[in-house]
Image: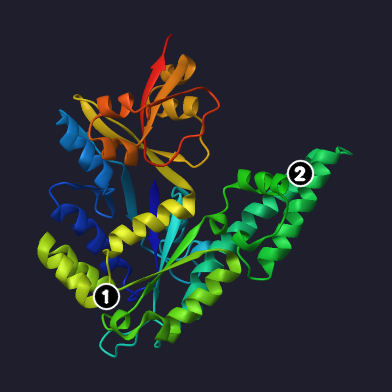
Amino acid sequence: MKLGIVGLPNVGKSTLFNAITNAGAESANYPFCTIDPNVGVVTVPDSRLDFLAQMYNPKKYTPAVIEFVDIAGLVKGASKGEGLGNKFLENIRRTDAIIHVVRCFDDENIIHVEGSTDPLRDIETINLELIMADMEMVERRIDRAKKAAKGDKKFIHEAEVFQALYDHLDAGKSARSFECDEDDMALIQTSDLLSLKPVIYAANVDDGAFAAGIENNEYYNQVVKFAAGEGSQVLPICAQAEQEIAELDDEDKILFLEEMGLEESGLDRLIKCSYTLLGLISYLTAGPDEVRAWTITKGTKAPQAAGKIHTDFERGFIRAEVVAFDDLKACGTMAAAKEKGLVRSEGKEYVMQDGDVVLFRFNV
């Protein structure tokens, strides 16, 4: 999973990026590595995988990972190539979802690029750049469909769908909020639009906002209301506090979070939010050689899940031996789970569940 972090200058974007990547670096169990200066890979904390590692003492421990990209270079006019606009937009195009950091605090010592705190204005600034870039792409799609039509109902309909989408974008609305049936949305999704990408609005509040009650932060409430209108998610977070948390050991980290009235760090909450946003789950494989988490889309059937490991597993799929993690943990060993009949043999139509511990049987 690749998540692009965007935001205007001085909203806390880089602070958040540094905090979540440092969080990965500080934990021995969840290492972090830098691919290049603005890309970091953070492993996904998973207590289920830790339990399996204790059970099997494997040679290799492989958690799921998330790639965070600190996307810089946005200025007004980015869609027209201003500043680092073209690079900025191309970086977003390669992500699965966008984390849009929005400033929701006042601080006279941190000057906002626009001179004041206004989360809706900031959201609109970035969204409009994405929308304007999409309008150019949609316009080209309409032209191609019209040229290919020549009485063909398929292309006539395609031109109509994209024209309706163009009008929607022209009204300053993102492709995410465009309403149509499943078939038309599937058609639209072939165009790789920027404003169609799922978004988590990271409402960056000051360190006193959680203690005071996040619902009392008017800036945050504005973001929540806006996000609801386009079906996006909102995650309240304090980037500055997260940076401090990332530098603490586990015991101090727990105390710090308790003082803020939180049970989990922003990184953990962001990961969960991302999985929910993209409809992802994890299944687990375990043995003396390796314990590993595999990320799949919710609704994936067993053969396709097996294909994540190797295409031969899908091609020669016979069955999947499955036990729910909670059942395995309660039993203590795989042998005990089998004795109680909790290890099931599932066929090609089985839909994988989050936390399934699986052994795939195949023959090629």
**Left or right for 313, reference 245:** right
Residue in the foreground of this view, choosing between 6 and 360 = 360
Name the residue carrying label 1.
261
Q: Quadrant of the C terminus?
A: top left
Q: CA distance from mark 2 to mark 1?
A: 54 Å
**Residue 294: x percent and y percent?**
36, 36
Q: Secondary structure at mark 1?
A: loop
Q: How many marks?
A: 2
Residue 292, quarter of picture: top left
Residue 35 in sight here? yes
Q: Nearer the viewer, mark 2 or mark 1?
A: 1
The residue that label 2 is drawn on is 145
Crowdedness near tag 2: few (<14), some (14–19) or many (≥20) residues, C-alpha within 10 Å: many
Residue name at image x 41 percent, y 86 percent = 216
Q: Quadrant of residue 238?
A: bottom left
Is residue 70 visible in the rendered structure shown here?
A: no
Q: Residue furthest right?
A: 151
- Relative to the observer, which residue lies in front, 230 or 128? 230
**Residue at 74%, 48% in the rendered image:** 143
Q: Residue at x 69, y 47 (%)?
A: 182
Image position, residue 193 (x, y; %) = 57, 53
